[in-house]
């Protein structure tokens, strides 16, 4: 039997280059990819923050004032109960690398709506290793919920 031939290598002949087309070839490429990953993580965390904040506002708007309803008045939000529920829901929110730094719950002047605003910081994954770059990004989410049942 004859000898088998080895397949020709497709690796580049110049030193320092990698055969994988997706590999980083220059330190600037690694830096750009690290920044892209950090910004993507911050964007996803902000989307999740907005979802939780909107849900908290909607649920808090459901905390109706029973005295107003008993007297035949319009559906109004119970301020204390709405604030407690919104803060509880936002504080229960747990996403890795995202830290809640503040939640503001406000009731509309007419008592028929709730607005929740939340600020959080996102820990940078790669940017924290760069000199002069803050280790966190600040993100904001807000949600609005109308009181009562809508048709």
Image: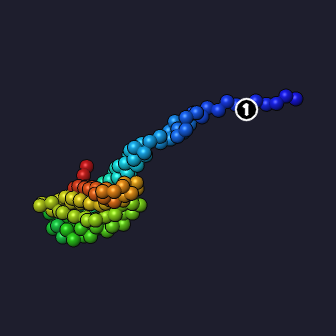
Q: Residue furthest right?
A: 1
- Residue beneath the point at 27% across and 70% down: 84
Position in image of residue 109 (x %, y %): 11, 61
- Residue beneath the point at 47% across and 40% down: 25
Q: Residue furthest front?
A: 15
Secondary structure under tag 1 reads loop
Is 24 situated above or below 82? above
Q: Residue furthest top?
A: 2
Residue 45 or 111: which is nearer the viewer? 45
Residue 20 visible here: no
- Residue beneath the point at 17% across and 59% down: 112
Indicate left or right for 37 with 151 as reference: right
Indicate left or right for 9 with 45 as reference: right
Indicate left or right for 41 with 81 as reference: right
Position in image of residue 30 (x %, y %): 43, 46
Q: Quadrant of residue 134?
A: bottom left
Position in image of residue 105 (x %, y %): 21, 64
Residue 21 visible here: yes
Q: Quadrant of residue 130?
A: bottom left
**Quarter containing the N terminus:** top right
Other-residue count near label 1 (Cα within 10 Å), few / some / many at <14 / 14–19 / ≥20: few
- Residue beneath the point at 44% across and 42% down: 26
Residue 44 or 33: which is nearer the viewer? 33
Residue 77 or 73: which is nearer the viewer? 77
Position in image of residue 56 (x %, y %): 30, 60
Q: Which residue is mark 1?
A: 6
Residue 49 or 88: which is nearer the viewer? 49
According to the image, what is the colour scheme of the structure? rainbow
């Amino acid at each position: 039997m004859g000898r088998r031939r080895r397949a020709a290598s497709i690796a580049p002949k110049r030193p320092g280059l990698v055969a994988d087309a997706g590999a980083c070839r220059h330190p600037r490429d690694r830096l750009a990819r690290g920044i892209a990953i950090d910004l993507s993580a911050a964007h996803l965390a902000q989307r999740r923050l907005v979802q939780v904040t909107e849900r908290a506002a909607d649920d808090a708007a459901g905390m109706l004032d029973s005295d107003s309803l008993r007297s035949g008045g319009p559906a109004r939000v119970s301020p204390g109960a709405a604030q407690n529920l919104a803060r509880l829901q936002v504080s229960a929110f747990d996403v890795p690398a995202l830290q809640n730094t503040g939640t503001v719950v406000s009731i509309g002047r007419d008592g028929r709506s709730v607005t929740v605003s939340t600020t959080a910081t996102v820990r940078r994954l790669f940017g924290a290793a760069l000199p002069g770059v803050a280790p966190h990004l600040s993100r904001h989410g807000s949600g609005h919920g109308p009181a009562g049942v809508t048709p």
